Amino acid sequence: MSEMRAWFAAGMAKLPARSPTTEAIRYALNHWDGLCQFLEDGRIEIDNNSVERAVRPIALSRKNALFAGSDEGRENWAAVASLIETCKLNGVDPQRYLTGLLARLVNGGPQAQIDALMP
């Protein structure tokens, strides 16, 4: 790894400062400790694909909210989408959760303790 780091440093000296290759090398050097930690601990995954797959629906939902019609509509959609994705991330059926939540609120549920009702 020390040889690779030296090779990166030498390569950066030969490349234009704003080239894509220089930017990639700079990124690798800025995250060098994390890279070395990955190599020393086999429990650490080499990529974050699983995290990216988990948050992709949230990002897509956020994009869809741009077309909600108004600022208030976007805010409401963002709140509902956040609840749905939080349910999914916690292994809770979103439809069942929201049905139960709304029924509890309509029937005089603990609105003051709304945090206790989160999925």
Image: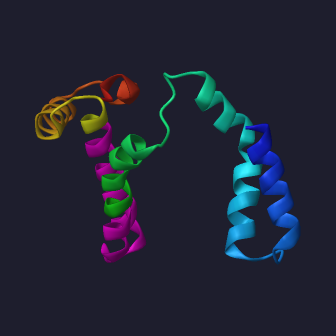
Q: Which residues are magenta?
A: 62-86
Of residues 33 and 91, which is closer to you in this image? 33
Which residue is at a point 71% across and 44% down the rendered structure image? 31
Name the residue nearer the viewer: 50 or 15: 15
> From the viewer's perspective, is 84 left or right of 2?
left
Q: Nearer the viewer, residue 77 or 10?
A: 10
Where is residue 85 shown, x and y percent of the image? 30, 44
Q: Going by the image, does 12 lie left or right of 57?
A: right
Residue 66 x, y percent position in the rendering: 37, 73
> In the rendered structure, does residue 1 fall within the stretch colored magenta?
no
Q: Quadrant of the N terminus?
A: top right
53 vs 11, nearest the viewer: 11
Find residue 70 and report its horizontal and vertical position in percent: 37, 75
Q: Position of residue 38 (x, y in %)?
A: 59, 31
Quadrant in the rendering for residue 2: top right
Name the residue: 76% across, 49% down. Answer: 29
Relative side of 2 to 108, left or right: right
**For residue 58, side relative to residue 100 (left or right):** right
Quarter of the image where one finds residue 76 = bottom left
Q: Is any atom of residue 15 visible in this view? A: yes
Residue 85 belongs to magenta span: yes
Q: Main secondary structure of the magenta part?
A: helix
Question: In the displayed image of the protein, which residue is found farthest to the right?
Answer: 13
Q: Is 55 rendered above or below residue 14? A: above
Location of the C terminus (image quadrant): top left
Instruction: Tell me which residue sits at (31%, 72%) in the image.
Output: 68
Number of marks in the rendered image: 0
**Residue 111 vertical position relative to residue 10 in the rendered view, above or below:** above
Report if residue 112 is visible in the image: no
- Identify the colour scheme used: rainbow
